[in-house]
Image: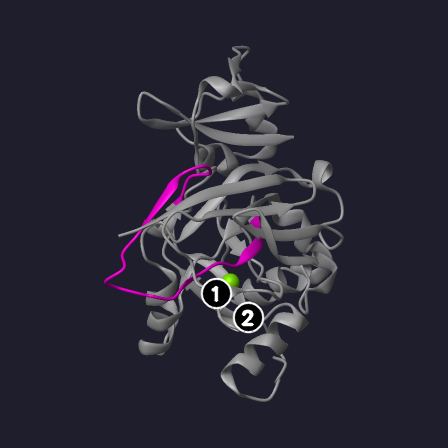
């Protein structure tokens, strides 16, 4: 199944997406729906129908707290990063978790407003995002996949110069509009094996990243197990699982976002998260 949030009178409303039709859900938000026990969810799905093309989509879910992210979770990206920084490749023994403020989340299709005075090095990162469906803690790896509500695309837009200048990555990763998310959430039974999905990024139609989630150094089950050690995960929490090789700063020469660019994150089994860039 696929879940969306769509705009109605300026408010994000939850819905179930079937091909080109949205079935509205009665809860206030998709976050509230996700937090319901699975057995209680069906009762909130209406019998109304709305054409997908008649509405604008919102980001499918806004979590209650920061987006959990993973740095260097694809081998080739770890290598290109080390090369660009003039360092030796050192693979982490544990996932390098950091976070991104939820205020950075932007809708699928939205124009992103970035400020030239803050950064001249806005970069892209195509990522598979996991949406947690169950309150959980100390989850064993073999139970970790049971905690997942679904999957969506995230573009971990990053101001590289701010990331460096502030030492801690949070600021350079959390500017407004720097976390486009969507276009919808695909549930696990429809998505299939999340470690066997093609992931790609295109800038103005030209492919810059092309990999597969099979290349993750820490698979999703391990990420959930490590993150939930001693730390409760909540329904609606998002884990961005890292980006493959091909990001702008590690290219020769480096390629940063420019005013008017169109970015597309495409993940097999989900679809395309498309955003345009306005830098002023
Ligand atoms: Mg990232």
Q: Are marks 1 and 2 in contact (CB under 8 Å)?
A: yes
Q: Is residue 72 above or below residue 31?
A: below
Q: Is residue 125 magenta?
A: yes
Residue at image location 42% in from the left, 31% down from the top: 29
* Disc 2 CB within 8 Å of nearest ligand 1 atom: no
Residue at image location 39% in from the left, 44% down from the top: 106
Horizontal and vertical percent position of residue 39: 61, 29
Residue at image location 76% in from the left, 48% down from the top: 193
SS state under label 1:
loop
Q: Bin the neighbour count of mark 1 within 10 Å (Cα to Cα): few under 14, some 14-19, many 20 and up.
A: some
SS state under label 2:
loop
The extreme left residue here reads 117
Horizontal and vertical percent position of residue 82: 56, 81
Residue at image location 50% in from the left, 55% down from the top: 233
> Distance between the Cα atoms at labels 1 and 2?
6 Å
| Mark count | 2
Horizontal and vertical percent position of residue 182: 51, 41
Q: Write down the region rendered in magenta.
A: 106-130
Q: Which mark is residue 251?
A: 2
Q: Which residue is mark 1?
A: 255
Q: Bin the neighbour count of mark 2 within 10 Å (Cα to Cα): few under 14, some 14-19, many 20 and up.
A: some
Q: Is residue 63 above or below residue 72?
A: above
Q: Is residue 132 magenta?
A: no
């Amino acid at each position: 199944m696929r879940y969306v949030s769509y705009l109605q009178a300026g408010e994000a409303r939850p819905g179930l997406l079937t091909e080109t039709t949205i079935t509205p859900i009665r809860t206030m938000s998709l976050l509230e729906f996700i937090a319901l026990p699975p057995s209680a969810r069906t009762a909130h799905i209406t019998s109304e129908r709305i054409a997908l093309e008649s509405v604008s989509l919102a980001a499918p879910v806004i979590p209650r707290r920061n987006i959990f992210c993973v740095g260097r979770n694809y081998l080739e990206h770890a290598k290109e990063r080390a090369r660009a920084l003039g360092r030796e490749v050192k693979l982490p023994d544990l996932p390098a978790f950091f976070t991104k403020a939820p205020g950075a989340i932007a809708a699928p299709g939205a124009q992103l407003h970035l400020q030239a005075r803050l950064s001249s090095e806005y970069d892209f990162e195509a990522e598979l995002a996991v949406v947690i469906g169950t309150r959980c803690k100390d989850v064993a790896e073999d139970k970790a996949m049971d905690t997942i509500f679904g999957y969506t695309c995230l573009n971990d837009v990053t101001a590289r110069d701010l990331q460096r200048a502030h030492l801690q990555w949070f600021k350079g990763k959390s500017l407004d509009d720097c976390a486009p998310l969507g276009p919808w959430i695909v549930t696990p039974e429809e998505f299939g094996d999340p470690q066997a999905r093609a992931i790609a990024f295109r800038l103005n139609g030209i492919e810059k990243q092309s990999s597969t989630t099979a290349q993750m150094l820490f698979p999703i089950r391990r990420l959930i197990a490590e993150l939930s050690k001693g730390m409760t995960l909540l329904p609606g929490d998002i884990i961005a699982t890292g980006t493959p090789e091909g990001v702008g700063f590690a290219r020769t020469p480096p390629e940063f976002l420019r005013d008017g660019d169109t970015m597309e994150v495409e993940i097999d089994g989900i679809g395309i998260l498309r955003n345009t860039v306005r830098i002023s």
